[in-house]
Amino acid sequence: MKNILIIGWKTLSKPSGYYSLGALVIGGFIAGIIFWGGFNTALEVTNTEAFCISCHEMENNVYEEMKTTIHFSNRSGVRATCPDCHVPHAWTDKIARKMQASKEVWGMIFGTIDTREKFLAHRRGLAENEWRRLKANDSLECRNCHNFDYMDFTEQSERASYQHSTALADGEKTCIDCHKGIAHQLPDMKGVEGW
Amino acid sequence: MKKFNLAVIASLLVLTVSPIMYSLNANAADKETVNTVATLRDHTPINVQKEPNAIPKVINKDIKQGRNYPMQPPVIPHTTRSYEVNKNNNKCMSCHSRHRTEKSQAPMVSVTHFMDRDGNFLAEVSPRRYFCNQCHVTQLDAEPLVENTFTDMHSLMKAKAKSKEH
């Protein structure tokens, strides 16, 4: 084992004795494109709803619940998929979120929420994770579609336009402060502000 | 043996009479005299699926509607789509509970909701009054399917007082 490593290091540290510099540079460039493209393609595959609900934990709980909400079925046919709300769109944030999500793979392997009962028992904690995340990034994932600058208050109901033009406009509140449980059912809300 | 004969005669009688009764009933339904529920189907034949009506919109104007009698639970003047009212939480109470009304400016649940069935006041909304939509309902922007001839006590008394004057 040690010998193999030493031979490998010696090969890498010596100048190339056979291949031309051009072949190495161009070959490296092409390999880079393939690896980078492959990496991003794989990343995008994990960013689809089909991937999310390939685990029964997601398909039987949160996905089923979402089907009844306005983010799944509505008059205009625009719908949100899992990553639209749960994964940041910017690349660095996305990678950070994906690293966190490796914990979910752990949960999947060890069956942390593999029954409805277990899921319900964990629901408050899981929900709080998402509330905390959205609170911290000023509901970034909501705002990816719902842009405050283009909200027409005259089209909103009186109560909605009042709240949006006051609390939301001066940054006192962010989307998630009021709009909890809009895509999934809520946990026991005892002690949550506003409930 | 005699009993058996009787039973046979009785069952034959039922067999012959019931189709006649059935056709009589059917005739009555045709005349639109008995079966008022059929009007909801616009007299579509029983073997045909009725074209469903368009679903009316929920009234969302936030304007209080009058009550038809003093004890009527007030109707909800806004949409309540996906408001959860269950063991875990009660979305209505995030505006209508006592400690939220100042912020929300929504009417507070009336004090009767804090009473148990013996009339004792509890600190929280009584469990028997917890499920708001058992009594309070949203209103649809639609014409009534059946005419309502209800007259409230106030109008009755007014009419009576007027007739006495004359």
Image (spheres, rainbow, N blue to C red):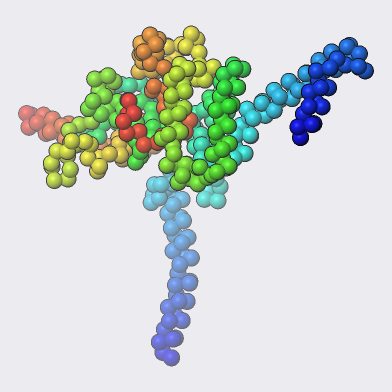
Does residue B152 appear in the picture of this structure? no
**Of B90 and B155, which appears nearest the observer?**
B90
- Of all residues, the one furthest to the right in this rendering is A18
**Of B166 and B18, which appears nearest the observer?**
B18
Total label count?
0
Q: Is residue A194 left or right of residue A37?
A: left
Q: Is residue A93 left or right of residue A192?
A: right
Quarter holding the C terminus of chain B is: top left
* Image spot of residue A115 (x, y percent): 50, 46
- Of all residues, the one furthest to the bottom in this rendering is B1
* Image spot of residue B46 (x, y percent): 52, 50
Residue at coordinates 73% horizontally, 20% vertically from top-left? A36
Does residue A27 appear in the picture of this structure? yes
Residue at coordinates 78% horizontally, 27% vertically from top-left? A6
Q: Is residue B129 left or right of residue A189?
A: left
Instruction: Identify the image quadrant of residue B70.
Output: top left
**Of A87 and A183, which appears nearest the observer?**
A87
* Image spot of residue A42 (x, y percent): 69, 28
**Of B6 and A185, which appears nearest the observer?**
A185
- Of all residues, the one furthest to the left in this rendering is B165
Residue at coordinates 76% horizontally, 35% vertically from top-left? A1
* Image spot of residue B52 (x, y percent): 51, 38
Residue at coordinates 44% horizontally, 52% vertically from top-left? B29
Relative to B77, does residue A14 appear above or below in the rendering? above
Quarter holding the N terminus of chain B is: bottom left
